[in-house]
Amino acid sequence: MRSKLFYMFVCGFIAATTPISTTAQQKFSRACSFEDIPTSLRNPFLILRDIIGEGASGSFNYLRTADANTRRNHYILESLTVDYFNVQFALYAENQVYVLYCPVGQVQLNSQCNWRIDYTFKSAGNNGWVAQSLNPVTIADTRLSIFFTNRGFLYSARAGHPSIIQNLTPPPPSNGLLFANPVVVGNHAFRDNAGLERSLGKSVASNCNLSEWGLGAR
């Protein structure tokens, strides 16, 4: 079941208050440090990760008691294309994760710092085209109700790491670089009723993008 569910990640994180266009497609990205997730959401998020993400259940349980620096070095890097109400279209998402590297001891954003594409992700499915929803059992799980209280019916294509969380602890100083906060640039598209591919443009994120988390309480 998990192999099917990881195609779509956290559709409950989409706020039901998001404006719905004529065709109801929306797009967003997230570059979120675990440290930046509100405290009330961390445990439910880890439960949801165990249900949806690849890897052994409990793989990231150490984050429950980890120090702030360890939490800060674990990231959720993703882009989602979503559609509401019915599976009308195939959806597509891909992204590039840009990371700023600077020489040790140098101030970020100076002339010696360089942006690099460290990761690229594409939604699972038929060459990236998919429209998946969370299992109703997951949605009904009371431990996760904070994510689903305000959610609408939606379907999603997600571009992101299969394990959901990535440990991006900075490399040793011996390599002469310092890891800096990543930026996710997503590309989004859908196929219309005639089967033509339609671009939804790009999304850019350098934070948790909390406005797109469907919270039952804040």
Image: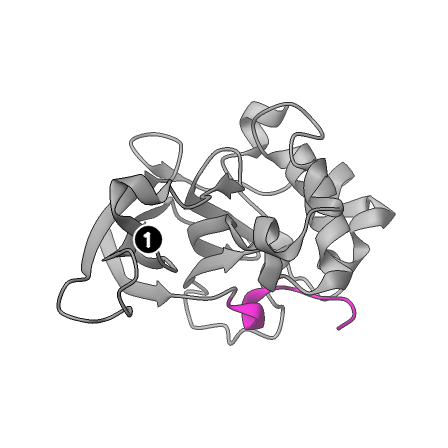
Point out the residue furthest to the right here.
142
Percent position of residue 156, x then y:
49, 48
Prevailing SS of the magenta stretch: loop
Percent position of residue 76, x then y:
50, 50
Q: Residues within 10 Å of mark 1 (few under 14, many from 20)?
A: some
Screen quadrant of the C terminus: bottom right
Residue name at image x 20 percent, y 57 percent: 115
The quarter of the displayed image where residue 129 is located:
top left
Q: Is residue 81 left or right of residue 152?
A: left
Residue nearest the viewer, comparing 177 with 180 = 177
Say what amino acid the circle numbered 1 marks.
Answer: Leu
Residue nearest the viewer, comparing 190 with 121 = 121
Whether residue 192 appears in this view of the structure is no
Q: Is residue 186 left or right of residue 21?
A: left
Magenta residues span: 209-218
Screen quadrant of the N terminus: top right
**Above or below for 165 versus 212:** above
Residue nearest the viewer, comparing 200 with 166 = 166
Residue name at image x 56 percent, y 73 percent: 211
| The stretch drawn in magenta includes residue 98 | no
Residue nearest the viewer, comparing 102 with 186 = 102
Percent position of residue 112, x then y:
14, 63
The quarter of the displayed image where residue 183 is located:
bottom left
Whether residue 164 appears in this view of the structure is yes
- From the image, tell me which residue sits under label 1: 178
Q: Which secondary structure lies at badge 1?
A: strand
The quarter of the displayed image where residue 5 is located:
top right
**Above or below for 182 versus 20:** above
Residue name at image x 29 percent, y 56 percent: 104
Percent position of residue 96, x then y:
28, 50
**Total marks drawn?**
1
Instruction: Tell me which colouring the rendered structure shows.
Output: one colour
